[in-house]
Amino acid sequence: MNKPATASGALPRPTLTLAESLAMVVGHVVGIGIFKAPAIVAGNAGSEPAFFALWIAGGLVSLIGALCYAELGSAYPNAGGEYFFLRCAYGDSLAFLFAWARMTMIQTGVIAAIAYVFADYASHLFPMGSQGSAIYAAFAVIGVTALNAAGSYQGKRAQFFLTFALALAIAAVAVAGLAHGGAPHAAVAGNQGATSAGLAMIFVLLTYGGWNEVAYLTAEMHDLRRNIVRSLVLGILVVTALYLLLNLAYLNTLGLEGMRASKAVAADLMRATLGEYGATALSLVVMLSALSALNASVFTGARTNYALGRDFRLFGFMGKWNERGGTPVNALALQGGVSLLLVLLASSTPDGFQTLIAYTAPAFWLFFLLTAMSLVVLRRRQPVEPARFRVPLYPVTPLAFGAACAYMLYSSVDYAMSLDPASIGAAVGIAVLCAGIPVMFLARRTARP
């Protein structure tokens, strides 16, 4: 198999430690979802044990997927991450479409969505008029992009600090809820049915999403074989523990019925335990969470653009690695520009965050499914070297993860198309993905050998 050529002499170097890689995993996963999704999950769970079972199932699905990614990342370390896996398994065309989708939809859409949540909370605390959210979101994207463009050391240090502070903040919120006297646990209606459970899993796995971003750090990870497994497994275990602890606090303070009736469970928890000052503190926690996820997304997101420019001369300007700062500066700049455009588009819709999630979700789960199956394709084509990590219980593990991805692809499309604002985002997303097809044919003529 030919290795992609490099557009410039500088290459990523293995400098990420286990602690830094673990911070990236936790920082990517623990985002704004845990402050929004539990109320929706509670509304589709028939009982408190069923509610917890959904969150445990989300952790298990994530863990199975992480083991698959650990083998792919260990056997095929590359700054392109999933893009490189897909290229090795399926060839240039599908890999290009993934990189196009990630550049225009998946990663940039996630960055814009996170920035939008940060902006909403910032506008609540420090109002700036009717366009305050768009202004705050734009400044968040520009600031975090500039931080990462200044050098990978700055981005890694910022991520380590933000993740550590975020974990402490979530633990503090959980302790406040658990120390509360408790809410009356009223009788709960019977099971909501399979359709409701499927809807709940969309939001559970959305909240667990982001651990796959470690694939883009494999070219920069020290002691890859050990650290990729450790960072993924430990990261998901830490996240699962934080989520279960915080959901237990929600239930203790609000009860399942109180969660169902809540529009912002975390704010209601803090208001019930510490009053309005607590709700203000919670807003700061959400802003911190959003910045942590935003920094991690910006850090890894530009790596795909770098790989695309490295492999296709049409986008060669992105394939330049700044050796002094240890970053793909041009790729970061393009990613920031597209994210700003999506922030602007989202600001013109009734629910910008929901529209952006619908815009990204179908493409995300489609390529997640294809990446899961790439492990099977690559195993059949080229056995894994003994020195690399091998996923346990093969082929059951990748097939189980692929089945979960297929179900989520169906559920995300069905959910997105059922909502008017979100259906607009989904339609635009499909159009953008299709627009990548003619660009793909043009770019293939400039593919590097």
Image (cartoon, rainbow, N blue to C red):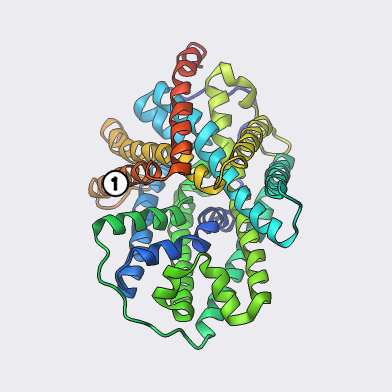
Q: Callout 1: 10 Å neighbours few (<14), some, many (20+)? A: some
Secondary structure of the residue carrying numbered label 1: helix
Answer above or below: position of 185 versus 99: below
Name the foreground residue: 14 vs 63: 63
Q: Position of residue 352 (x, y in %)?
A: 56, 45
Kindly identify the amino acid type of the residue bearing the numbered disc 1.
Tyr
* Residue sitting nearer the eye, 393 or 166: 166
- Judge from the rendering whether residue 25 lies leftward or rightward of residue 200; answer left or right: right
Q: Position of residue 273 (x, y in %)?
A: 58, 81
Instruction: Write down the quadrant of residue 362 in the picture.
Output: top left
- Going by the image, does 96 lie left or right of 284? left
Query: Can see residue 387?
Result: no
Quarter of the image with the N terminus is top left
Q: Is residue 117 left or right of residue 414?
A: right
Extreme residue toward the bottom, this view: 181
x and y, in percent, of residue 198 in the image = 30, 54
Q: Residue at x 74, y 41 (%)?
A: 150
| Residue identified by numbered label 1 | 407
Does 262 sit above or below residue 408? Answer: below
